[in-house]
Amino acid sequence: MSTGLTLAALQFSLALSWTVYVVFLPALLTQAGLAPSWLPWLLMADQAVFVLADLAAGVAADRSAAALRRLGPALLAATAVSTVAFLALPVLAGAGAAPWMLAATVVWAISSAALRAPVAALLGRRAARPTLPRWVAWWTLGLALAGALGPWLTVQLRGSDARLPFVLASLALLAATAALLRVERQWPPPVPTYPAEAARWSRPLAWFLLAAVALGLGFQGHAQLNAAPQYLRFAAAAELPAWLSLFWVAVGLALWPAGEATRRVGAVPVLAAGAALAALGSALAALATGLPLLAIGQALSGAAWGAVLVSAWTAAVQVGRSGREGLSSAALSALLALAALLRIAAVAAQWPQQPTVQAWLPWLPAGLWALAALLIARTHPGRGVSP
């Protein structure tokens, strides 16, 4: 259980750092003397860095594991760099050093992205095959907790001094990384990888990655674009943080059943079922004529998204056996970051405010998630993406 809590704490710290960053970024830009128009461009640049850094870190993690070296030193170095850059952001902004603040933002984005792929490679290389979905569920729990806390934290932190939240988030990340290093020393060393065993980029994998794009875009549309306007039809603005947390609470509650189902029947069936149920939940939310039906739709889509995350990460890690666990999981992470980039770009272009877009936007996530379910169905068990 201590290993699971460590994995959850690391993912929670990473997600919490991003929440703190997004909450304070507008004020930091103002303090640094930058116009508000910088905000969407900087957020898009962050996501672009995540895409590239995830892939690079995945390749580096695989090379480290292939050489039978432990990942601890690389994780510790990335955490140290990430912490220093993150702590420098409010200091540099307060000093009006805009160029240095932007440079620190890039360094933080690269170093924080470098913490994700090595952990996935560690799970893929060290975790026993039957236990992998359980560890992935623990890892995803940290994301669910941060997501549930995010709306409330956004309200509480807005307008406050940025330095203390930045320090606390950095300390949490350092503590979680230190705990992970202890866990790594307790696990057996990685098994040598031979060229003949390397994972091949097959047609089922191509369908899987296409499905990941649809899944990521569906999530961005449902949770980031549609959820708040849908709730505001029936609830007061002051109640919004609590209702937005419902999706992530459902994610957290679904993780262990999803992990057990993934272990028993395989990642592909659970992933396809999760995508289909997420589409159903999103459709119910779009059709809702009152708060109860909307809450049911949001809870169903949240639980289904929890199943999607567990099965998708499990499939991504297993697709890379043996030797490319880092790259295959980094590809999934990069595609999800790309979906976030596209959503930020759409908001910056004010597309969601266009009347023609507003007519079909509530149905976009359901369509994308249904498409993902169909694409996943084309990945046949035993051909690279099933346990």
Image: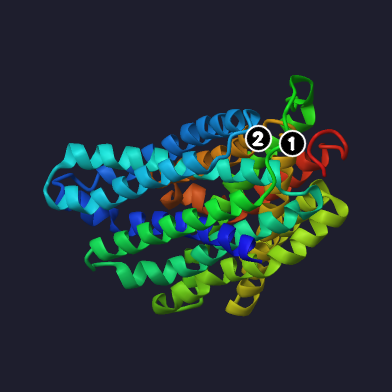
- Residue 298 x/y as whole percent: 62, 67
Residue density around tag 1, few if under 14, some if 14–19, many if 20 or more, within 10 Å = many
* Residue type indicated by callout 2: Ser
Looking at the rendered structure, the secondary structure element under dot 1 is helix
Looking at the rendered structure, the secondary structure element under dot 2 is helix
* Residue type indicated by callout 1: Val
Is 140 left or right of 260, judged from the image as shown? left
| Number of residue marks | 2
Q: Residues at badges 2 and 1 in contact (C-beta under 8 Å)?
A: yes
Colour convention: rainbow
Q: Which residue is mark 2?
A: 328
Near-viewer residue (215 or 128): 128
**Dot label at residue 190:** none
- Residue 235 x/y as whole percent: 48, 78
Q: Quadrant of residue 19?
A: bottom left
Q: Quadrant of residue 99?
A: top left
Q: Which residue is mark 1?
A: 319
* Residue lying at 51% horizontally and 36% vertically, measured from the top left: 54
The mark nearer the N terminus, 2 or 1, is 1
Residue density around tag 2, few if under 14, some if 14–19, many if 20 or more, within 10 Å = many
Q: Quadrant of the C terminus?
A: top right
Tell me if I can see residue 372 in this picture. yes
- Residue 161 x/y as whole percent: 22, 65
Is 167 left or right of 54, judged from the image as shown? left
* Residue lying at 31% horizontally and 68% vertically, measured from the top left: 157
Q: Quadrant of the N terminus?
A: bottom right
Q: Looking at the image, which residue sits at the far top?
A: 195
Tell me if I can see residue 336 in this picture. no
Q: CA distance from mark 2 to mark 1?
A: 7 Å
